């Protein structure tokens, strides 16, 4: 489904007419209308505190959530950021349309691979007037990264993510994971927990990895702090 729509009855009577709402009208929709959509996202309406009005960062998948949360802690970044993981890169455009319709402020982070660049083009066309200058204020491509794992140097990836310094990596980290059939979310969660427990500090990482992490964190934090981004 490329664009999200919601169905809402106009009244409480059984024979009341039905209207179709597009993403830009969802902000005015009733909670009953949005309930199936939020349920599909795994959100509990009664207690959810995940979706905030501001500082939302839409991500391709849950591994990005774990890594970026860890990077925020490693760098002690003060800018508030609420990371929200989609269930795949192909769902990002729909998620972005939903957030726009709800009137929520957000930016989007994608990998610099074919799928990520495709989503960037879709968002630029559908949300940002087909203007690269405008799109670049709201969409971040992880430069040179086919996956977020490529932020790490090969040595640091083997030591702190794979926990296997004997691993033979002849390509990008993300490509190695695909070929080795390793679980991206599990490895990302384990890395986050190691950071949370103080077992991995920024100073433990080599200069290349530190630089890449700081660059990504700084880029995201800068766009969230930008008044233009808050008007998305």
Image (cartoon, helix red, strand yellow):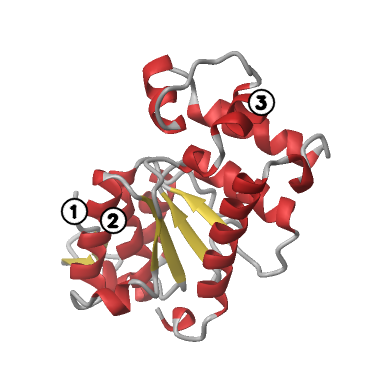
Instruction: Locate residue 192, reporting x and y percent.
Output: 68, 38
Disc on the earlier residue, 2 or 1: 1
88 displayed left or right of 70: left
The earlier-in-sequence mark between 1 and 3 is 1
Residue 20 in sight in this render:
yes
Whether the residues at callouts 2 and 1 have beta carbons within 8 Å, the answer is yes
Taking 160 as reference, is 29 above or below it?
Answer: below
Badge 2, how many Cα within 10 Å: few under 14, some, many 20+?
A: some
Q: Disc 1, disc 3: CB below 8 Å? A: no
Element on which disc 2 rests: helix
Residue 168, disc:
none
Q: Nearer the viewer, residue 218 or 32?
A: 218
> Closer to the camera, 193 or 40?
193
Q: Residue at x 34, y 50 (%)?
A: 112
Is residue 47 visible from the viewing direction of this image? no
Q: Secondary structure at mark 3?
A: helix
Q: Position of residue 90 (x, y in %)?
A: 27, 45
Q: Nearer the viewer, residue 124 or 165?
A: 165
Observer-side mark, 2 or 3, equals 3
Q: Position of residue 26 (x, y in %)?
A: 33, 69
Q: Residue at x 60, y 13 (%)?
A: 166
Which circle's residue, 2 or 3, is located before the other in the chain? 2
The residue pinned by badge 2 equals: 94
- In the figure, is residue 117 to the left or right of 32? left
Quarter of the picture holding the C terminus? bottom left
Helix, strand or loop status at disc 1: loop
Rendered image quadrant of residue 18: bottom left
Q: Is residue 136 above or below residue 7?
A: below
- Mark 1 or mark 3: which is in front? 3
**Residue at label 3?**
159
Q: Residue at x 20, y 69 (%)?
A: 126
The residue that disc 1 covers is 2
């Amino acid at each position: 489904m490329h664009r999200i729509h919601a169905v809402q009855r106009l009244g409480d009577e059984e024979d009341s007419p039905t209207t179709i709402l597009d993403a830009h009208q969802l902000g005015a929709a009733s909670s009953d209308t949005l309930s199936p959509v939020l349920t599909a996202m795994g959100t509990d309406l009664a207690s959810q505190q995940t979706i905030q009005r501001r500082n939302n960062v839409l991500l391709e998948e849950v591994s990005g959530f774990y890594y970026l949360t860890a990077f925020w802690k490693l760098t002690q970044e003060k800018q508030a950021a609420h990371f929200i993981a989609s269930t795949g890169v192909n769902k990002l455009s729909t998620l972005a349309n939903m957030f726009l319709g709800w009137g929520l402020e957000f930016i989007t982070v994608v990998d610099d691979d074919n799928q990520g660049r495709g989503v960037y083009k879709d968002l630029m066309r559908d949300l940002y007037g087909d203007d690269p200058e405008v799109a670049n204020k709201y969409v971040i491509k992880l430069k040179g990264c086919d996956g977020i794992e490529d932020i790490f140097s090969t040595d640091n990836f083997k030591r702190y993510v794979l926990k296997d310094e004997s691993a033979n990596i002849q390509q990008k980290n993300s490509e190695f994971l695909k070929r080795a059939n390793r679980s991206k979310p599990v490895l990302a969660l384990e890395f986050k927990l190691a950071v949370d427990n103080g077992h991995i500090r920024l100073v433990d990482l080599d200069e290349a990895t530190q630089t890449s992490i700081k660059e990504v964190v700084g880029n995201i934090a800068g766009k969230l702090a930008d008044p233009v981004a808050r008007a998305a």
